[in-house]
Amino acid sequence: MSVNNYIQIRDFIELTFEDQDYYFIQIIKRRKENPDMQTGTHVIKCYFIDSVEKFDKKMSEIIDLCYHNNARAYINLNKRNYKKTALYMIKYLTDLVIAGQENAAIKAFELCSGQHAADKNKKWILDVDIKDMNVINKIIEDIKYLKPEGSKVYMTLPTKNGYHIITKPFDPREYSKIHPDHEIHKDNPTLLYIP
């Protein structure tokens, strides 16, 4: 089943770019869909998206790479910042040199981009592997009453087996009491495209 969340994500990020900010996209090939792979995952390519125009321009290339590699495209909706990522990279590289592991420096900027958000308005992901919209709507209603009270949902994106509910932060302990089987991801990517 193909999933394309490009339009919803584009509408969401359209007005959010500030100086030095970018969104981090990875095309990832997984052993789950490619049983002949030696490792669990393999990053095909990374993109650093710092404008809507760049996002639009790269999307057809992203779709082609996903299709030809039987891979998925993921985007982290918590913005990154070039300067902050570069500073984390300097620390990471220094630690590698001290440890005598200079050969691991090849993918330093990509690694640091994946690990360090710079977004003032954090976005969490509720990963719900259920296709029933009644269940999804119940979850959305439930989190409205968790602290801080009020609407917390930015959008709901389809995945292969269910939905990612993109939210503002809330009290995760209270949520886990109501929905113990759902994962809360505080800085993980969401699905952009599956061929």
Image (cartoon, rainbow, N blue to C red):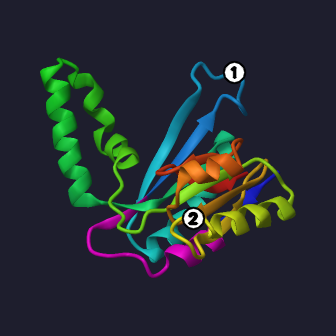
Q: Does the magenta stretch include residue 7?
A: yes
Q: Tell me which corner region of the image, top left, top right, bottom left or bottom right, holds residue 153.
A: bottom right
Can you give x and y, in whole percent of width and height, for residue 139 in the image? Answer: 73, 61
Task: Count numbered badges in the picture.
Answer: 2
**In the image, is residue 42 above or below residue 188?**
above
Residue named by callout 2: 167
Say what secondary structure mark 2 lies in: strand
Residue 65 visible in the displayed image: no
Horizontal side of residue 34 vs 78, given as left or right: right
Horizontal side of residue 89 vs 9, given as left or right: left
Residue at image coords 26%, 23% = 103
Question: Tag 1: residue type?
Answer: Asp
Residue count near mark 1 (Cα–Cα under 10 Å), binned few <14, some 14–19, many ≥20: few
Residue at image coords 76%, 47% = 129
Q: Tell me which corner region of the image, top left, top right, bottom left or bottom right, holds residue 99.
A: top left
The residue lying toward the viewer, choosing from 39 and 87, is 87
**In the image, is residue 155 above or below residue 73?**
below
Give the label, 2 or 1, closer to the camera: 2
Residue 183 visible in the displayed image: yes
Question: Tag 2: residue type?
Answer: Thr
Q: What stretch is highlighted in magenta?
A: 6-23
Can you give x and y, in whole percent of width and height, for residue 83 in the image? Answer: 21, 59
Say what secondary structure mark 1 lies in: loop
Can you give x and y, in whole percent of width and height, for residue 28 in the image? Answer: 57, 41
Q: Tell me which corner region of the image, top left, top right, bottom left or bottom right, holds residue 151.
A: bottom right
Residue named by callout 1: 36
Q: Are marks 2 and 1 in contact (CB under 8 Å)?
A: no
